[in-house]
Every structure is written in structure tokens, then in C-alpha cells.
């Protein structure tokens, strides 16, 4: 991911941390999701009001995002994860290669998190799905973490999921 | 029990308490990885009658794959067995568990969530009152004169990674930070009011490197084996299960690191003149705390507690805070605050008759008299103890 500072200037979010790796490396081990999310959460939470609990919440949310990219990922290209901060809000930008056939899926999944029936969809997913779909995971972040999600598609074949997490307010 | 190398978690079912417990980090790639745990839950459901408690108090992380899998079993059971209720017991520390499991109630009313707002010791409310804060500060000021010299004998060194568990208003963490320059210090307490005060004080001094965190000392989010030096002052004595707390202190301490604790033996508070009245009152203090499941006689038992928790190289010493430590009025102020809380609140709550309370108060007043008397002596004994977690 390039132009970190330029991206951060948007909305006054300050860059905190950025990680990038080859998708092949990322996809080589499922535990990369857990380890990356735990590490990054600790790093960015150290100066929050309650670092331990902020880290716990942030790790949950980031792990879910990483798992989404893991499950939909292909071996080519690179995955990048950047974290920004503005006041009580953290912004995560997760960029990864997305085959053309999946772009529409992500557009719709992210869009559904912002619709009025998001909660009903989430409850329906828990109630009926045997395993969580990627759509249900994104709904979980919107419902349980008050996250705001959007998609950036400026650099195909990459897509970027942008998620704003107001965790400082939830934790403290 | 199920574990993976990187994300350990525990799954247990206790048929006696009808409690299914999930703890640790559960982030499987697929449901297959937690098939044994799912099977345990199904087996638990088959065994219980009436209600199944699902304890997630010590659940540190759980991904959606695991959540959906466990939720699926619970929801299916609700549909098949109308006679069964599920109570999910969550912690107020890990707030997302309350949110996530709370949705299950919207789907099946048989599932309810109870937030374990742990009152580990029934007397917690007595000392969390904001009016008590100045006295806590004075107490720390007076004990610090001694502990500043004692702590190095128990192994504290500059550059250590430290945790102060049950940090209260955070003043001890501030003093330790200044005196011993730890590389990192985490200060944990279960009182949001105390932590808010601690953060305000730290901010006022421009201190940003003490990690104050809300937590349950007997169920901490902190990981195993990460601190060189763990302190826990005046707290085991007011937990109704000090061994449980000590087990947690042991867990977060690094092998080779030390856990340091202070506790009192209240019945040994003393003073001259009027020693008999003072002695009677403090013996009654010990009984009063005992009524509320707190052992303020724990100090000399520290060695036993540390040994039974698995520590070695145990060091125990005692010191006496007295009216000669600085301004005698400070000592008198502490005793006056004790009188207000112990006689004015705790004895009243126990239902003691007025004549008892009046005699009870008199001992505190005599202690103050001794403290302020030009030839008087008043003392408050404290035991400092530490043990090493074996390598």
C-alpha cells in the first residue's frame, strides 16, 4: 500500500501503523489472522485510556476483517493493513486482491451493513446460517462494534475495505 | 479440553453446577477444529435439567465461526427442549461478549445473559466511596515511607515489566513509576471510579505511560507469564477467595519473577495510652470483616498462601506505620476514616446495636487520642510478603 500519508490526510485521520505482506505468505497459515490482529491491536492501543481492553476489542474486529480476506483471498498480489486514528475513532484500511467475480459481492455486503434492516439481517444470519458468511461477519462488526464500513475500488484488482471503529467510546 | 499451539482455549463442563465454560482464545478456521468442544456442549445439554449456565467470563477472544457454531447448538436446543433455559454468564470486562450473546435472547427468549458484575468481596462498596479517596492517598503516603525501602528487598529493580493489581486510585503505581522506573507498568482495578481518579491524577502530572485498565483481578485479560514484578497491596485480605486471586497473580508473573503483596493483621493495631479500649475495638474490626467474608488478619498467613500457590524463595517481613511517621494528624485522619466506615457503615449494616457501636467507636477515638498525644504512640502493623514463581 502506497501513499499512506496522502490517504490519511483524508478526514484528518493520522497514520498509526501499516503492515504489508505477500498474499501467498498470508494465506500460508490461518494463525496469521490471530497473530497479526493481536500484534497490531497491542501496538495501536498502548496510549488509549484502557489499553488492555481497547486492544481486546480492536483485535476482535481486525481479526474478523483479516479472516474475511483470508477466506476470499487468492495467492497473487499483496495484502496491506493500515490503521489510522482521529480522536476516539480508529480507521482500518484493509487492501487485498479481489477477483472480478467477487467485487460485486463485497459491494453488496458492505452496502448491507449500512441499511436500515442490518440488524434484522444479522439476527437472521445467527438464527439460520450453519456457519457465518462473510456478509454476516461484516454485519457483526457494524452491529456489535458500531463500525461504519465502506469500500474503495480505486486500484483494481485490489479492493480496500475501510472500517471506522469507535472503540474508545465503547471501551471507556 | 481443547487446545491449539497458538490459540489456547479451554472447554469444560461441570455437571454439578450445570455449567459449561469457554475460556481463552477460540479462533478456529472451521467448525471441524472445535468439533470436540461442540460435542461437549451437546453432551452437557443432554445431561442437564432446568438450566444450563454457559460461562464465558474468561473468554478472551472468539471469532464468528466459533460464535455461530456454539450459538447454533444452543438455539437448536431451545427449539427442541422447551423445558430448558440457558444463562450466558459474561464479564463486564470483555464487553463484546455481552453484546454478541445478548442477541440470542432476541431469537430465543429461553436464552438470557447475565453480566458477571463481580462483587468479589462484599465490602467492596465500603471502600469505593469517593469520600474515602483522600484517606487512601494518606494511607499510601504513610506506607510508602516503609515500602520504598522494602520493595528492593523483594526484588524490584528499574527496567522491570510490572503490574499493580487492585491498584485502587493508582497512587502506588505513580510512586513506583517515579522511584523504580519500570519499563512498563499496568495498573488494574475493578472500580471504574477509582480508575477515573487515577487517570485524572496521572494526566494532571503529564504521565501517560501507566496503563490503567479495568479488570477483574480474579479473571484477568492479561496473558500468562508476562510480568517481572506483580504487586497486590491490601487486597487479598478483602477478597473472599484470596487463593483464587493469588492463582491469577501467579499466572501473569513470569517464571523467575516475583509477586509482592501487603496485608494487615488488624487485631494487632495498637496504641498507648488507652491500649485496652484500642485492642478491643480492633479485635472487633477483625470479626466485623469476617462477617463480610474478608480476612483482615491475613498478614501473617501470607507465607502459607504464597507457598500453597506454588511460589518459592518466599520473603516475609512486617512493618509498623505509626503516628511518628511524619505528621501525627495524618495517622489520626486515617483512623477517623476507619471509624466512619467500620462503625458508621459496616457495623450498622451488620445490624449491631447502638451500645456496641458506641463502644466500637470509642476504641478508634482512643487510637486517635494516642496518636495525637504528645507522649503517645499509635501503630498499624502491615505484613509485606513476596514469592518467586519457579523457573
Image (cartoon, coloured by chain):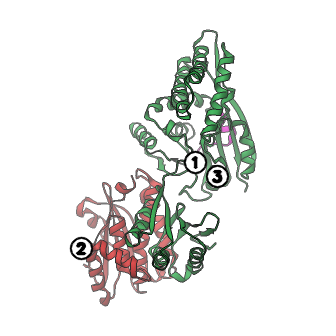
- Whether residue A116 is visible, yes or no, is yes
Q: Residue farthest to the bottom?
A: A101
User: Residue at the location (32% across, 64% down)?
Assistant: A146
User: Residue at the location (46% across, 55% down)?
Assistant: B92
- Whether residue B320 is visible, yes or no, is no
Distance CA(mark 2)–CA(mark 1): 46 Å
User: Can you identify the residue that label 2 sits on?
Assistant: A115
Chain under numbered label 3:
B
Front position in the image: A36 or A155: A36
Question: What is the span of residues highlighted in magenta in the rendered image?
Answer: B150-160
Q: Secondary structure at mark 1?
A: strand
N-term-proximal mark, 1 vs 3: 1
Q: Nearer the viewer, mark 1 or mark 3?
A: 3
Front position in the image: B24 or B163: B24
Label at residue B162 = 1
Q: Secondary structure at mark 3?
A: helix
Chain under numbered label 2:
A
Quadrant of residue A21 in the image?
bottom left
User: Can you identify the residue that label 3 sits on?
Assistant: B244
The chain that appears red in the image is: A
Give how far across and how far down residue B308 sits, in percent.
74, 50
Quadrant of residue A55 in the image?
bottom left
Q: Identify whether A24 is placed above or below B295.
A: below
The chain that appears green in the image is: B
Give how far across and how far down residue B123 sits, in percent.
54, 39
Amino acid at each position: 500500500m502506497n501513499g499512506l500519508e496522502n490517504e490519511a490526510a483524508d478526514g484528518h485521520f493520522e497514520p498509526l501503523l501499516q503492515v504489508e505482506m505477500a498474499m501467498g505468505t498470508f494465506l500460508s497459515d490461518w494463525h496469521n489472522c490471530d497473530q497479526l490482529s493481536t500484534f497490531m491491536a497491542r501496538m495501536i492501543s498502548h496510549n488509549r485510556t484502557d489499553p488492555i481492553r481497547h486492544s481486546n476489542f480492536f483485535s476482535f474486529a481486525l481479526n474478523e476483517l483479516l479472516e474475511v480476506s483470508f477466506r476470499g483471498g487468492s495467492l497473487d498480489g499483496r495484502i496491506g493493513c493500515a490503521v489510522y486514528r482521529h480522536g476516539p475513532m480508529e480507521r482500518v484500511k484493509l487492501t487485498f486482491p479481489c477477483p472480478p467475480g467477487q467485487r460485486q459481492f463485497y459491494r453488496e455486503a458492505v452496502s448491507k451493513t449500512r441499511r436500515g434492516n442490518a440488524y434484522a439481517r444479522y439476527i437472521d444470519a445467527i438464527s439460520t446460517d450453519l456457519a457465518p458468511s462473510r456478509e454476516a461477519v461484516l454485519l457483526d462488526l457494524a452491529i456489535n462494534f458500531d463500525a461504519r464500513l465502506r469500500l474503495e475500488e480505486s486500484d483494481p484488482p485490489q479492493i480496500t475495505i475501510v472500517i471506522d471503529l469507535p472503540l474508545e467510546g465503547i471501551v471507556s | 479440553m481443547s487446545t491449539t499451539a497458538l490459540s489456547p482455549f479451554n472447554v469444560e463442563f461441570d455437571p454439578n453446577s450445570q455449567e459449561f465454560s469457554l475460556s481463552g482464545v477460540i479462533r478456529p478456521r472451521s467448525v471441524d477444529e472445535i468439533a470436540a468442544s461442540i460435542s461437549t456442549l451437546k453432551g452437557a445439554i443432554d445431561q442437564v435439567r432446568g438450566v444450563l449456565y454457559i460461562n464465558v467470563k474468561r473468554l478472551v477472544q472468539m471469532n464468528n465461526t466459533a460464535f455461530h457454531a456454539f450459538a447454533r447448538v444452543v438455539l437448536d436446543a431451545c427449539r427442541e427442549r422447551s423445558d430448558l433455559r440457558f444463562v450466558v454468564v459474561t464479564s463486564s470486562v470483555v464487553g463484546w461478549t455481552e453484546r454478541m450473546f445478548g442477541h440470542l435472547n432476541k431469537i430465543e427468549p429461553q436464552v438470557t445473559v447475565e453480566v458477571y458484575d463481580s462483587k468479589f468481596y462484599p465490602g467492596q462498596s465500603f471502600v469505593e466511596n469517593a469520600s474515602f479517596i483522600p484517606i487512601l492517598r494518606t494511607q499510601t503516603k504513610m506506607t510508602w515511607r516503609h515500602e520504598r525501602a522494602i520493595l528492593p528487598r523483594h526484588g524490584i529493580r528499574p527496567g522491570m515489566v510490572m503490574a499493580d493489581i487492585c491498584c485502587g486510585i493508582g497512587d502506588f503505581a505513580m510512586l513506583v513509576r517515579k522511584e523504580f522506573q519500570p519499563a512498563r507498568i499496568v495498573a488494574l482495578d475493578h472500580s471504574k471510579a477509582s480508575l477515573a481518579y487515577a487517570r485524572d491524577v496521572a494526566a494532571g502530572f503529564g504521565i501517560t505511560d501507566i496503563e490503567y485498565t479495568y479488570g477483574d483481578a480474579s479473571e484477568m485479560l492479561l496473558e500468562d507469564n508476562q510480568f517481572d514484578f506483580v504487586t497486590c497491596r491490601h487486597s487479598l485480605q478483602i477478597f473472599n477467595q484470596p487463593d483464587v486471586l493469588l492463582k491469577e497473580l501467579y499466572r501473569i508473573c513470569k517464571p523467575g519473577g516475583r509477586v509482592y503483596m501487603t496485608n494487615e493483621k488488624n487485631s494487632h493495631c495498637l496504641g498507648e495510652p488507652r491500649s485496652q479500649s484500642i485492642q478491643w475495638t480492633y479485635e472487633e474490626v477483625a470479626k466485623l470483616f469476617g462477617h463480610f467474608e474478608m480476612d483482615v488478619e491475613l498478614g501473617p498467613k501470607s507465607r502459607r498462601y504464597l507457598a500453597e500457590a506454588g511460589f518459592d524463595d518466599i520473603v516475609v517481613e512486617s512493618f509498623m506505620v505509626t503516628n511518628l511517621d511524619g505528621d501525627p494528624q495524618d495517622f489520626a485522619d486515617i483512623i477517623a476514616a476507619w471509624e466512619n466506615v467500620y462503625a458508621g457503615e459496616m457495623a450498622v449494616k451488620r445490624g449491631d446495636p447502638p451500645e456496641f457501636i458506641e463502644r466500637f467507636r470509642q476504641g478508634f477515638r482512643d487510637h486517635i487520642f494516642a496518636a495525637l498525644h504528645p507522649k503517645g504512640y499509635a501503630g498499624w502493623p502491615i505484613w509485606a510478603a513476596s514469592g518467586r514463581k519457579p523457573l
